[in-house]
Image (cartoon, rainbow, N blue to C red):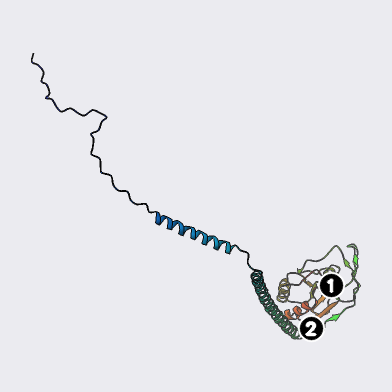
Amino acid sequence: MAPPNKRPPQGRRPAQGKRPTQAKRPPQARKPAQTSKRASSGASTSAGEESIKAEASTSTRAPAPAETSRIAEERKAKREAARQERIALARQKQKAKRRKQMLIAGVVVVALLGAIVYGVQRSRGQAAISRQAAQAAGCGPVQEIENQGRNHIPLSETFTDYNSNPPTSGPHYAERVANWGSYNEETPQTTLVHNLEHGGVVIHYKGQTDDQVDSIDSFVESFQDGVISNPNEKIDKPIVIASWTRMQQCETFSADALAGYIRENCNKGPEKLTTCRR
């Protein structure tokens, strides 16, 4: 067999762990120490600290008595000025409130006066219309009738000795009172007197045509309460309107004339239980 090929010899490697030696650099001259600058810096720093300490000691030093008194006076003056400002503002608000209240009161007074004047004028106007209507309807003056009391009687008894026709007071049934409104048959007087005691008004009529009766009934039904129409052949005049201790006789029916009587005499009985509102 042929011998194996051998590698050609190479230069030996240096031993591991050992580096080749290098040429040493020549020594350089050291820089001179800057002792003068550091010293001057330290000196300036020390001087600054001393200045700050001096200022601090000066600022923390207690002010003189005169300065303290001046500061106290300034604070006192400021507080007094603020107090005076608050007082002035409160007074302004109070004045504004009083002006507003006076304005409202003035408006209310004017409104009340206007309402009173309007009511008086309206009442006078209605009274004038009623007087003219009463004259046109042949109505006599309103008669004042003596009070016969208001004793109650049982339903088993009757009473006819009244001092007027129709009656305007006197004994009546306690358990019976007529409903407000119009009737096409005569209602007992001992019942109707109870209605007069409650402050109601009763319109008695006789000899009326159907159209006239319809007019009377429509007039009565225009009231919410307090008014009754009652056919009554025993009265002396075609129309007689009665209330507690008062009555008026008319030749013909007049809504304006009867309305005037009702305004003046409704709810004037001993027991005020009605309004005669329309």
Within-10-Å neighbours for mark 1: few <14, some 14–19, many 20+: many
* Cα gap from disc 2 to disc 1, whole angstroms: 23 Å
Asked whether disc 2 touches disc 1, contact meaning CB atoms under 8 Å apart, the reply is no
Q: Residue 148: x and y, percent?
A: 91, 73
Residue 26 sits above or below residue 57 on the image: above
Q: In this view of the protein, can residue 182 be seen by the observer?
A: no
Judged from this view, the residue extending furthest toward the left is 2
Residue 133 sits above or below residue 50 on the image: below
Q: Quadrant of residue 227?
A: bottom right
In the rendered image, which quarter contains the C terminus? bottom right
**Disc number placed over residue 71 in the picture, else none:** none
Give the residue number, with chain letter if any, for mark 1: 269
N-terminal of the pair, mark 2 or mark 1, is 2
Residue 54 sits above or below residue 93 on the image: above
Counting the numbered discs, the total is: 2
Left or right: 27 as drawn, with respect to 38: left
At mark 1, the secondary structure is loop
Q: Nearer the viewer, residue 158 or 150?
A: 150
Left or right: 222 as drawn, with respect to 265: left
Within-10-Å neighbours for mark 2: few <14, some 14–19, many 20+: many
Type of the residue with mark 1: Gly
Residue drawn 64% across the image and 68% down it? 64
Q: Residue 252: x and y, percent?
A: 76, 81
Give the residue number, with chain letter if any, for mark 2: 139
Left or right: 78 as drawn, with respect to 24: right
